[in-house]
Image: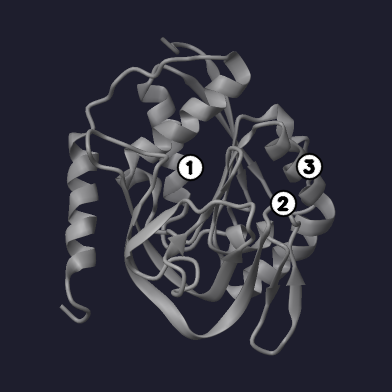
Amino acid sequence: MAGGLAVRIAHLYPDLMNLYGDRGNVIAIYRRCQWHGLAPELLRITLDEKVDFRDFDILFVGGGQDKEQKQICMDFTKVKGAALSDAVEDGVVLLAICGGYQLLGKYYRTGTGEEIPGIGLLDAWTEAGRKRLIGNVVISSDLVRVGSDHTVVGFENHSGKTFLGKGLRPLGRVLLGFGNNGEDGMEGAVYRNCIGTYLHGSLLPKNPALTDYLIGASLRRRYGEAQLKPLDDTIESIAHEAAIHRARQPVGR
């Protein structure tokens, strides 16, 4: 069992990148670590701080509006980008939501043609779309499985359309909603232990299997094999099923 093992968590830009309850993802990671008998430590990292992210186990960056995204863009690409890339290559877990996800790619091209650079960690790029992709989402993901269920639920609200290069696999296949771009039926991206996704809502409280996947990956990197004890996820499962039910409802109901 994994009792007592330390898990260091870094929350990037918590004061700037926190749309639609994204902070709840950090809370979910921290609490589930405690419930698994682990010893989590949470540090908040913001602008101008130089950090060796390889010293952490789990990294998180949320989404933000265009104003906040532009505000952190220089810091993300000039100050922290190389350290983030080094950490992901070293196996550190990283979860990035919406704007944070976009900045992991090569660039984001706005509707006016302005190109906001990303750090190029992911072989992906984002183009501004003409309509907003908004609503509840259900995807099928091979990363999670509880019995016969392998769904992930969330909420998306983005106008950017993200496209993946040939060497990058999606987080999952869209069952309900739009996903990366509303065209190819894919949502999110996975590279090593890094996950980028458009799913807000917040994502992890309603998807405990995904939360445990991230925690388990961090433990394997730091300690080798470490078994997580089963938890009673009755409430989380109810929230998960409620999100699926809501996603199936016609718009306007």
The Cα–Cα distance between marks 3 and 1, rounded to whole angstroms, is 20 Å
Question: Mark 3 highlights which residue?
Answer: 83
Q: Is residue 16 visible?
A: no
Residue 177, x across and y down, in percent? 34, 69
The reply to whether the C-beta atoms of the residues labelled 3 and 1 are less than 8 Å apart is no
Vertical comparison of 11 with 119: above or below: above
Q: Earlier in the sequence, mark 1 or mark 2?
A: 1
In the image, farthest residue toward the front: 166
Q: Nearer the viewer, mark 1 or mark 2?
A: 2
Residue 242 left/right relative to 210: left
Which one is closest to the eye, mark 3 or mark 1? 3
* Three-letter amino acid code at the position of disc 3: Ala
Mark 2: which amino acid? Leu
Identity of the residue drawn at 58% across and 67% down: 163
Q: Regarding mark 2 in the picture, which secondary structure is present there?
A: loop
| Label ID, residue 26 | 1
Q: On the image, numbered disc 2 is attached to which residue?
A: 121
